[in-house]
């Protein structure tokens, strides 16, 4: 939307990063079967701009799990409104820690079979 863009019509990188954090947080919560918090964001690369009106799709992949934490690779792809072509525009690695009701780290449960 226009409020999320600079004067040149490019979407703010911070807006894209917030969408990436939301997508990674969803993957983390599913894996942890509960609440998680972002503790680090690494290797974010902004390959190409996203323009006002583009459709944005995000994809996640859990690339590492520890006792309480996990690292999630996130890719963002854009599609111009009147095109079928998709282009990767950002990627990065987000690290989350599973937490309990007192907001303290808790062990990840065993992975569920697919």
Image: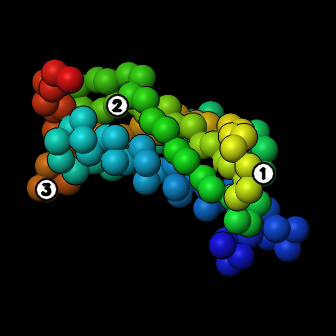
Residue drawn at x 18%, y 31% as measured from the top left: 108
- Give the residue furthest to the right: 8
Q: How far separated are the C-alphas under marks 1 and 3?
A: 40 Å
Q: Tag on residue 102?
A: 3
Say whether disc 3 or disc 2 marks the residue closer to the N-terminus: 2
Between the residue at mark 3 and the residue at mark 2, the CA separation in whole angstroms equals 20 Å
Mark closer to the chain start, 1 or 3 = 1
For marks 2 and 1, give the one nearer the viewer.
Answer: 1
Q: Say few, some or many: other residues with alpha carbon within 10 Å of mark 2 (under 14 / 14 to 19 / 20 or more).
A: many
Name the element at disc 1.
loop
Placement of the C terminus among the 4 image quadrants: top left
Nearer the observer, disc 3 or disc 2?
2
Observer-nearest of 16 and 1: 1
Is residue 85 placed above or below 37 in the rendered structure?
above
The picture places residue 81, in percent across and down from the top left corner, at: 70, 58
- Across and down, in percent, residue 2 comes to 71, 76
Q: Identify the residue position indicated by label 2 in the image.
A: 70
Q: Where is residue 24 in the image (x, y as percent from the top left)?
A: 42, 44
Q: Is residue 104 visible?
A: no
Q: What element carries label 2?
A: strand
Element under label 3? loop
Q: Image quadrant of residue 13?
A: bottom right
The Cα–Cα distance between marks 2 and 1, rounded to whole angstroms, is 28 Å
Is there CB contact under 8 Å for labels 1 and 3? no
Q: Position of residue 84 (x, y in %)?
A: 69, 44
Q: Name the residue under label 1.
A: 49
Which residue lies at the image location 72% right of the left edge and 40% below the top edge?
85
Name the side, left or right, on which 108 lies relative to 24: left
How packed mark 1 is, by other alpha carbons closer than 10 Å (few <14, some 14-19, many 20 or more), is some
């Amino acid at each position: 939307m226009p409020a999320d863009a600079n004067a040149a019509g490019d979407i703010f990188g911070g807006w894209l990063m917030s969408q990436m954090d939301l997508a990674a947080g969803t993957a983390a919560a599913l894996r942890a079967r509960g609440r998680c918090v972002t503790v680090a964001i690494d290797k974010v690369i902004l390959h190409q701009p996203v323009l006002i009106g583009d459709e944005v799709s995000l994809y996640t992949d859990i690339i590492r799990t520890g006792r309480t934490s996990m690292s999630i690779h996130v890719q963002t792809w854009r599609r111009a409104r009147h095109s079928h072509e998709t282009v990767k525009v950002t990627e990065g690695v987000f690290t989350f820690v599973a937490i309990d009701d007192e907001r303290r780290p808790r062990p990840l449960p065993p992975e569920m079979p697919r």
